Image (tube, rainbow, N blue to C red):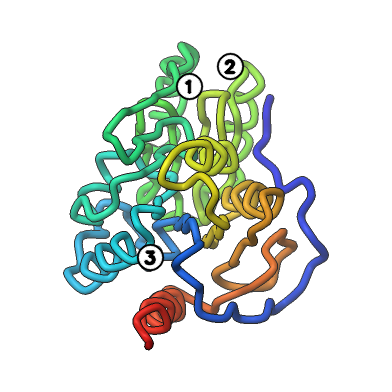
């Protein structure tokens, strides 16, 4: 079994200092979606487009000369639906698929063992009202926010299936995901930074989930830093913001600073 982790994370802290507004002229900005740009929803499909957020992202993309990417656990199609295709560079399914600014798409080959895992998980989610199985093609996510009592049974089943199928077991906020082995969010940062227009920029990764720790570490290794949304856990991020509203306020402040004479 492969388990996504947070190797190299810093000491546990309750609060990280808030970052100063970014100097957009030299920044390559990487943003998570759920919990960072959009509040966490009990059902992922309930998150939809917001004109104000779309306008903010389009303004950021222009000010950054295209050095803006969203790196999410969602699929490329879901990111585009929620963000109104306002961001050209997107990594989906935690880095297992990527679209570059020129429109080129790379996608990992799905593990053949996901089919057996899907068949095994279906009766479990059927047995717990409120729990449900999301099939992303490259991974399977069991959501149990609306059925918290299912947590232990879901964990046991997911761990067994990960061992049997050589799948990566990845924990999230009231969700466990079995994913095809392969690149993670940190690898996605590296792939984007290797190409124009990101090459030469200072990488800054903003996210809230455990899976974002790889993004924080990658940004730090390349001379940038991570920003944790939320608090109270061990993290490799050097700065912090309290919630989605604080992220948007910081991004607007960065835009305003860039426009100041």
Crowding at mark 2 (Cα within 10 Å: few <14, some 14-19, many 20+): many
Quadrant assignment, res 115? top left
Disc 1/disc 3 C-alpha distance (Å): 31 Å
User: What's the residue at 71%, 49% (across, down)?
Assistant: 221
51 left or right of 168?
A: left
- Please tell me which residue lies in front, 65 or 253: 65
Q: Residue furthest top?
A: 112
Crowding at mark 3 (Cα within 10 Å: few <14, some 14-19, many 20+): many
Q: Which residue is mark 1?
A: 117
> Which of the marked residues, 1 or 3, is nearer the chain's N terminus?
3
| Disc 3 element | loop
- Look at discs 1 and 3 and give the one toward the viewer: 3
Residue 8, given in percent of the width and then of the height, sits at 79, 49
Q: Which residue is mark 3?
A: 37
User: What's the residue at 41%, 59% (across, down)?
Assistant: 34
User: What's the residue at 42%, 83% (across, down)?
Assistant: 257
Residue 139, given in percent of the width and then of the height, sits at 44, 30
| Disc 1 element | helix
């Amino acid at each position: 079994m492969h388990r996504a982790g947070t190797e190299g994370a810093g000491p546990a802290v309750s609060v990280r200092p808030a970052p100063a507004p970014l100097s957009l002229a030299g920044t390559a900005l990487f943003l998570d979606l759920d919990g960072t740009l959009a509040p966490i929803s009990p059902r992922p499909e309930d998150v939809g487009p917001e004109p104000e957020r779309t306008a903010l992202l389009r303004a950021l993309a222009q000010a950054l000369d295209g050095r803006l990417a969203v790196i999410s656990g969602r699929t490329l199609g879901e990111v585009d639906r929620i963000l109104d295709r306002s961001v050209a560079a997107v990594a989906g399914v935690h880095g297992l698929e990527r679209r570059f600014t020129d429109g080129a798409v790379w996608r990992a080959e799905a593990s053949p063992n996901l089919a057996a895992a899907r068949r095994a998980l279906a009766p479990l989610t059927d047995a717990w009202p409120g729990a449900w199985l999301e099939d992303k093609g490259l991974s399977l996510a069991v959501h149990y926010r609306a059925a918290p009592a299912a947590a232990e049974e879901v964990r046991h089943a997911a761990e067994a299936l990960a061992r049997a199928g050589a799948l990566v077991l990845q924990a999230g906020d009231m969700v466990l995901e079995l994913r095809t082995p392969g690149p993670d969010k940190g690898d996605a940062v590296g792939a984007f930074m290797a190409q124009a227009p990101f090459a030469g920029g200072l990488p800054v990764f903003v996210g809230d989930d455990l899976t974002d720790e790889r993004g924080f570490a990658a940004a730090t290794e390349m001379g940038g830093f991570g920003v944790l949304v939320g608090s109270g856990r061990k993290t490799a991020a050097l700065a912090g913001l309290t919630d989605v509203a604080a992220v948007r306020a910081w991004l607007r402040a960065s835009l305003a600073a860039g426009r100041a004479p």
